[in-house]
Amino acid sequence: MKKFIFLFLTLFALNLSAQEVNIIPLPVKLDIKQKIVPFTIDQNTQIIAPDSLINSITYLKDYILKYYGIVIGGDSTFNKKGNIIKLEINAIKTVNPDRYELSSDDKQIQISASSPKGIFYGIQTLIQLLPYSRKAFPVQIPAVSIVDYPRFGYRGMHLDVSRHFFDVAFVKQYIDYLALHKMNYFHWHLTDDHGWRIEIKKYPNLTEIGAWRNGSIIGLWPGKGNENIKYQVLSSEVKITPKDAKIKTDEIRYGGFYTQEQIKEVVDYAAKRYITIIPEIEMPAHSMALLAAYPELGTEPNKKYEVAQTWGMMNKYNNVLQASDTTFKFLENVLTEVMALFPSPYIHIGGDEASKIWWKQSAVSQQIIKANGLKNESELQSYFIRRMEKFVNSKGKTIIGWNEILQGGLAPNAVVMSWQGEKGGMEAAKQQHKAIMTPEDKLYFNHAQFIKEDSLTAGKASLLINVYNYEPIPAELNNEQAKYIWGGQGCLWSEYITNPAKVQYQLFPRLDALSEILWSPKEKRNYTDFQKRLRIQFKRYDLMGITYSKRYLEN
C-alpha cells in the first residue's frame, strides 16, 4: 500500500513538473525540465539570501503568507542543502541590470542577477509559477530554467488623481500591480484643472483651495471623440450627441490631497519595488486649480477662477498661466519642494493643450512675446518650457513633457511623451531626444475595452488585441533614430473612474498586454498564445481579488 501511495505521489509530481507554464510578460528564454519532480514550498522552506536583497525577501515571504498561509524562514548564512530558495547577486556579464536567471528543481529554486532589481523581477516570475488557488496543496513550483531581461528601458504606467482622488492605500496597491508586471516607472498625475493633490508648504492655498471643487460633471462629456457614442447606464442604452447634451454637475464638494509625509511614504513603497515615481506638475495650461488658489498668476486681471467641475475645457475656459517672472518664481518654488520629495531624475511638467487664445488676448503676454523677440504664441510656449527646463536642469534633473512641448522648438534636454499618435515621438527621436510612446488610440486605458462597453468610458475603444499588437518603434525610423525610443506607457485618466474597482476594470487585462510589448522580445509575441496565458492570469486575479471584465472568458 505504501509503495502504491509513493508511486501515485511521484507520478502526480512528475505530471505537475510537465505542466504548462503561463507567465506574463513572456520571458526571453523558458525551458521546462521534463521528468523532474517540482519544488514544494512548506513550513520547512528557507530563503538563503544576503541582507542587500531584503526587498525581494520580504516581498516573497509576504506574498506566500498572504495567499497560502505558509510562513517561510530566511537566513543569509543558512546552510541547508534542500528545500531552499536561493537568491544571489553574481557577476553575470550583462549590459542589462534588469536581467535575471531562474532555475528550479525538486531541491531548490535559484534566482541570480547582477543587481537587486534583477532579483526582484525574478521574484515576480516565481510568483507566476505558484498555484493560483488558496486551496492548492501541496504548493509546488514546476521545474524550469529561465533567462530573462526587458526589451525597453522605460516601462511605465500613469494614474490621474486630479479628476478623481485615490487614497494612499490604493496608490500602493496600484504600484503592486505595476510591480507584478515588471513595470519600472509610475507617472503620478498630481495636478490639473480639477484638483491640486500635493501639499506645497510655501503655498498652502494650493491644497486649502485648489484641492477642492464644488461639483463634478454628471454623465459623458459631449466633446470631440465622444460624438454618437453609445454606452450603458444600468439597463438603458443612452446615445449622447452635442445637439441634445446638457452638462450638469452633482454640486457635491469633492477633493483631497496628499501630505508631504504621505508622498514620502508612497515614494519609499515604490522604491522597494524598484519603481521610480515621476511626478507631474502641469504647466502652462491645465492650471485652473492653481489659479483658483493664486489668481494673480493668470492672464486675466481680476478674474475669479474656480476649480473646474467639467472636463474638456481647452478653449472654453482660461486655464493658462501667464509667462511672467512672477509665475516662473512661483513654479520654481513649487518644483523645489516637489523635487525634494521625489528622488526621480525626471520631472514631468505637462505642456499639453495650452490654448494660445488666452496669450493672444492678453496684453501682458504680448509684451512678453515682444520683449523676448518671439514670433508668436507657439514660441511663447517654447519660451515657457525652456525657462522651466533650465531651472529643473540646474537641480540635476530632466524634464518630460507631452508632445506639445515640441511647439515653437524643443527644449534642449527634454524627453517627449507622445500621446497624439506617434508623430511627436518620431520628431523627438529624429532630433536625438528620448521619446516615450503613449498614443491615445492604443494606450489610453480610460477608453472602452470593447466596441459596446458595459460602463461609462471616454473616447473610442482601445481593444486588447490592438494594445497587444502595438509596436512602440515606428517603422519610419532608421536604426539610429530608433535608439531614442526609450519605451512606452499606458495612461489612465480618471474622468469616468471614481473608485478602485473601476480602476482595476479599466487596467486589466490591458496592463498585461502593455507589459508584454515593453518587456518581451518582439519576435516572440503571439496574441493567440497570450490569450491562453491570460486565462491563467485571470485565475490569479481571482486569487488577488482584482476586478476585470468576465467578457474575456466568453470566447
Image: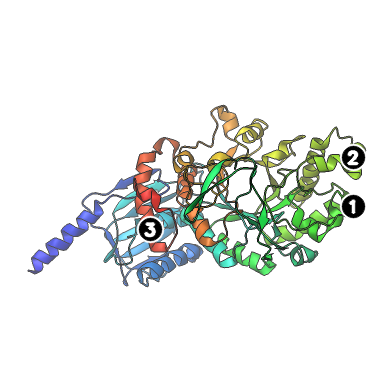
Crowding at mark 2 (Cα within 10 Å: few <14, some 14-19, many 20+)? some
Q: Nearer the viewer, residue 198 or 316?
A: 316
x then y, percent, for residue 300: 87, 50
Please name the residue that numbered disc 2 is placed on.
366
Viewer-nearest of discs 2 and 3: 2
Q: CA distance from mark 2 to mark 1?
A: 15 Å
Quadrant of the rendered image containing residue 443:
top right
Residue contact at pointers 2 and 1, CB within 8 angstroms = no
User: Looking at the image, which residue is at 51% across and 57% down?
Assistant: 502
Numbered badge on residue 321: none
x then y, percent, for residue 368: 90, 42
Q: Amino acid at mark 1?
A: Pro
Tell me the SS state at disc 3: helix
Tell me the SS state at disc 1: loop
* Badge 2 or badge 1: first in the primary sequence: 1
Numbered badge on residue 301: 1
* Badge 2 or badge 3: first in the primary sequence: 2
Quadrant of the rendered image containing residue 377:
top right
Residue contact at pointers 1 and 3, CB within 8 angstroms = no
